[in-house]
Image (spheres, rainbow, N blue to C red):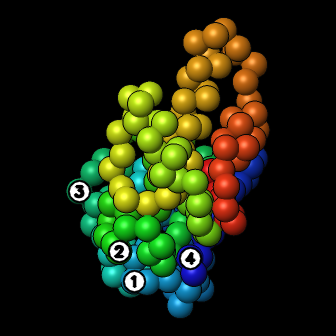
Amino acid sequence: MCGIFAYLNYNVSRERRYVLEVLFNGLRRLEYRGDPNSRLSLSVPPLVFRQGGKIESLVKSVYEEVAASDLNLEESFSVHAGIAHTRWATHGEPAPRNSHPQTSDPGNEFLVVHNGVVTNYEVLRETLVRHGFTFESETDTEVIPKPAKFVFGKANEEGDHDVTFSHVVLAVMRRLEGAYALIF
């Protein structure tokens, strides 16, 4: 079984470091629920960190990656979201490419962590490939953010600039079969 965890703050100023620590602590509480693979994502800017091994491997890897970049962990934001996941492999081997969050595209426009099984993922995957999407993982989860991007992009192409995040999520969920919990 997987463990999924999310953090959202609205109108409360928090530093990136604080959000990271909340996500790490959430993962520590869920660590017994998955295989030794954990991942997390931060929303500002959209960042994805993936690391095999125990939670502390992820913590070390994130801080090493941050130290090698120009990302300021002390920067505060009044709106911030983060999602995190411990993975039990239902589709695909335990490896960073199969870990969550899974993404819609290289720009990480839509990110998803998922607990459960999407039973019709093979049909969805084939349909998305026909529409030009490429897949990096072997997971059923990757068929969730890619159609979100497809639905959002199609609505914008058709001039529907009123499409909301809720509309996109509901449109994707109508296509999914199985038992699952999602965090976008």
Name the amino acid type tagged 4.
Cys
- Residue wearing tag 2: 94
Q: In the image, residue 136 lies at what x, y percent?
A: 33, 50
Identify residue for label 1. 36
Question: Which residue is pictured at 48% across the width and 78% down the height?
Answer: 88
Q: Which residue is label 3 attached to?
A: 68
Mark 4 lies on residue: 2
- Nearest to N terminus: mark 2 or mark 4: 4
- Dot 3 falls on a residue whose secondary structure is loop
Left or right position of 21 against 5: left
Neighbor class of circle 1 (other Cα within 10 Å; few <14, some 14-19, many 20+) is: some
Asked whether, in this view, residue 84 is left or right of residue 79, the answer is left
Q: CA distance from mark 3 to mark 4?
A: 30 Å
Q: Are marks 1 and 2 in contact (CB under 8 Å)?
A: yes
User: What whole-number distance in Å separates the C-alpha atoms at marks 1 and 2?
Assistant: 8 Å
116 is higher (above) or lower (below) than 146: below
- Distance CA(mark 1)–CA(mark 3): 25 Å
For the residues labelled 2 and 4, the Cα–Cα distance comes to 12 Å
Q: What residue is rendered at 27% in x and 66% in y?
A: 64
Which numbered disc, 3 or 2, marks the residue that appears first in the sequence? 3
Under tag 4, what secondary structure?
loop
Disc number lying in front (3 or 4): 4
Q: Amino acid at mark 2?
A: Pro
Across and down, in percent, residue 147 comes to 56, 38
User: Hey, what amino acid is under mark 3?
Assistant: Ala
